[in-house]
Image (cartoon, rainbow, N blue to C red):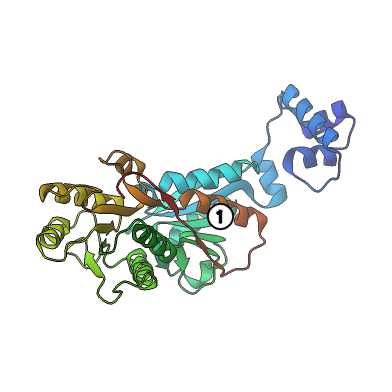
Amino acid sequence: MTVSLNDIAERAGVSVKTVSGALHGGSARMSEQTRLRVKEIAEELGYVTNLAARSMRQGWMPLIGVVADELITSPFATEIIRGLDGAARASDMAVFAMTLNGSRDVGAVIEEVRRFRPRAIAYAAMYHKTVALPQEFAETVGVMINCREANDRVTSLVPDEFGAARDITSYLVESGRKNIAFINLPGLLAGELREAGFRQAITEAGLDGAGARVLPAVRRAIYSDRAHSLVLSHITEMMSGPDRPDAILCGNDRVAMEAYAALRRVGAQIPDDVAVASFDNQVDIASRLDPPLTTMALPHRAMGRLAADILLGGDMMPGELHKLPFQLVERSSV
């Protein structure tokens, strides 16, 4: 037999409104003792929330919908979803995602998400970029994760790429490295911001900022890990010339893995001859390289948690841009 709110109210000796407030976060005022008592009775009787009925009353389901812009193909997808899901579950909410890729229209995917009547909708991207949402959906999406809305109409959470590059470069300088080359990711917003942070740190250190070497990791105008790599040729040329670098900063951990192989090929030791540092902290790569790789960890889980707080709290002004800091993970490559 289905257990109703009336059954719980009768057993607890309180009103149905109080039971609803205790179980569903309503506005009814009660002591913590009453709240716990109601929950214990509900569990004892085997009460299960009727989500359809609750949706009819509230106008939404206890869900956060995510428009996943190729996110599921990213190795960092789990970190964003874990952060979002953990914070959502603390508020008795669940998270679901709909994939957006090159063959699907963003408006159609948002409408598909809306059919489930979620409490809120987030837009999460595979990598840091700018996204132009159609005007009619700018108010539908509550927060952008790992991307920025092109017209600043939606609160956006992005990694602080500039700050991360400045910090890791300063770390290399403080470790005694004075001739640092940067093998960067061409054509990406993250690469552009990281180059600016790298040059800022070089200048602040009193080194030759204008002559700092920034080289593309691939031959293509836009970085892809499937594009023809230039890492080996760059390192071979630099290490055979008179101006050998004593540190190489890499655009991501995959590039760093290639740099390790190239340095070994030319007989250079890490970190004795050349220090290597990177971005992303793909643990399966960074921790298994020999020596383990010093890298800047992306704040994906923190972005997911903050996104849930914004969506469920509703106290952020639309259009705010939040830059979340990376975390330095020190290993043995510096």
**Label 1: which secondary element:** helix
- Along the viewing direction, whichever of 321 and 280 lies nearer the viewer: 280
Decide: is 30 above or below 42: below
- Image point 60% across, 41% down: which residue? 89
- Image point 16% across, 66% down: which residue? 243
Count of marks placed on residues = 1
Q: Position of residue 161 (x, y in %)?
A: 41, 63
Residue 247 visible to an observer of this rendering: yes
- Along the viewing direction, whichever of 82 and 112 lies nearer the viewer: 82
Decide: is 1 above or below 171: above
Q: Position of residue 136 (x, y in %)?
A: 52, 70
Q: Position of residue 322 (x, y in %)?
A: 53, 64
Residue 228 visible to an observer of this rendering: no
Horizontal side, residue 304 vs residue 194: left or right: right
Horizontal side, residue 203 vs residue 17: left or right: left
- Image point 59% across, 47% down: which residue? 63
Q: Which residue is mark 1?
A: 307
Q: Residues within 10 Å of mark 1 (few under 14, many from 20)?
A: many
Question: In the picture, residue 86 is in which quadrant?
Answer: top right
Tell which residue pokes out farthest to the bottom in this image.
210
Horizontal side, residue 258 vs residue 176: left or right: left
Question: In the picture, residue 290 is in which quadrant?
Answer: top left
Q: Position of residue 1 (x, y in %)?
A: 72, 23
Decide: is 262 above or below 49: below
Tell which residue pokes out farthest to the front in this image.
176
- Along the viewing direction, whichever of 44 and 237 lies nearer the viewer: 237
Kind of residue at badge 1: Ala
Tell which residue pokes out farthest to the right in this image.
13
Horizontal side, residue 236 vs residue 17: left or right: left
Decide: is 153 above or below 258: below
- Image point 69% across, 42% down: which residue? 53
